[in-house]
Image (cartoon, helix red, strand yellow):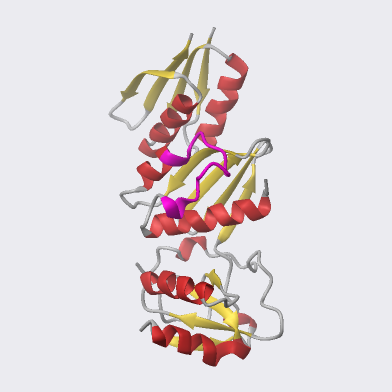
Amino acid sequence: MTGLFERFRKKKRGPSPAPAGGREGILVFSHTSEVIAAESCLRDAGFDVRVMGPPPALHTGCDLVIAFPLIRQLEVTEALRHRRIIPLQVVPVDDVLLEPVSLFHTVDYGAYLMVRAANMKLTIRKSDRMIVNVSGGGCPDVPYLAEQLVGRRMDEDTEPKRHGKTLCGYALQLAWEEMNRQCPG
Amino acid sequence: MEMEVDARGLSCPQPVLMTLEAIGKAKQGTITIVVDNETSTENVTRAAQSKGWTVLAVDKAANGINTIRIEKK
């Protein structure tokens, strides 16, 4: 899996602001499946976390990290431990080279807007938020996801996580959430 | 009226957006879209069908150039 997200890394920060109240930390995992499980666990527990790309100075782990408010490190690691999810590393972001990077890339085509999250691209028509294209990936469910989403408006039960369970489905979910943020209904 | 969209050398979503633009202009008739990869072929076909157009044919040449003909009466 290493390198899957490598070419999508961007230097700019993610769209969501860093958690209020100070420094951030990042959780590093061996596999993206652990990141997905950890994100779900921490969000369910009410933590303000974001999935991002690993910082340039980090040379371990998979292609996704989780950013969290460092002040809550003990609670975060405890919540993960209860679910038997053990990060490879917990790294304080105390240097610019340790800042996690955005997974998103946005292209404005005029009447259309495309958001790419990692390896998946979602394109909508701005006027009515109709999904006009889903592409990318390489997972077996991408054609199915595209079939389910294309031709429907964003608010018509199109949340990808309801339709796909692969890493591509997960990346598409991130793109869908970012699209909602950039082009709200 | 027959329109042609040449989307060779472009990656998605651009072939799809060009096709949708042509569909918006033509309203009906036949449109030929030329692409150079399988993903674009699938995405253009799906987009056209979602707009109520019928895919008449997908011709796949040995050099990787695919020609998609869509129609709406």
Coordinates of residue B39 in the picture (x, y in percent): 39, 39
The residue at the point 62 percent across, 48 percent down is A107
Q: In this image, A162 relative to B61: left or right?
A: right
Corner quadrant of residue A123: top right
Coordinates of residue A80 in the picture (x, y in percent): 44, 83
The residue at the point 38 percent across, 74 percent down is A34
Q: Main secondary structure of the magenta part?
A: loop
Coordinates of residue A162 in the picture (x, y in percent): 43, 52
Question: In the image, is residue A70 part of the stretch drawn in magenta?
Answer: no
Q: Nearer the viewer, residue B37 or B54?
A: B54
The residue at the point 59 percent across, 88 percent down is A72
Work out whether residue A64 can be spotted.
no
Question: In the image, is residue A151 part of the stretch drawn in magenta?
Answer: yes
Corner quadrant of residue A37: bottom left
In the rendered image, the residue lying farthest to the front is A45
The residue at the point 41 percent across, 87 percent down is A81
Question: Which quadrant is the N terminus of chain A positioned in?
Answer: bottom left
Question: Which quadrant is the C terminus of chain A positioned in?
Answer: top right
Coordinates of residue B14 in the picture (x, y in percent): 54, 37
Which range of residues does the magenta coloring cover?
Answer: A148-162
Work out whether residue A169 can be spotted.
yes
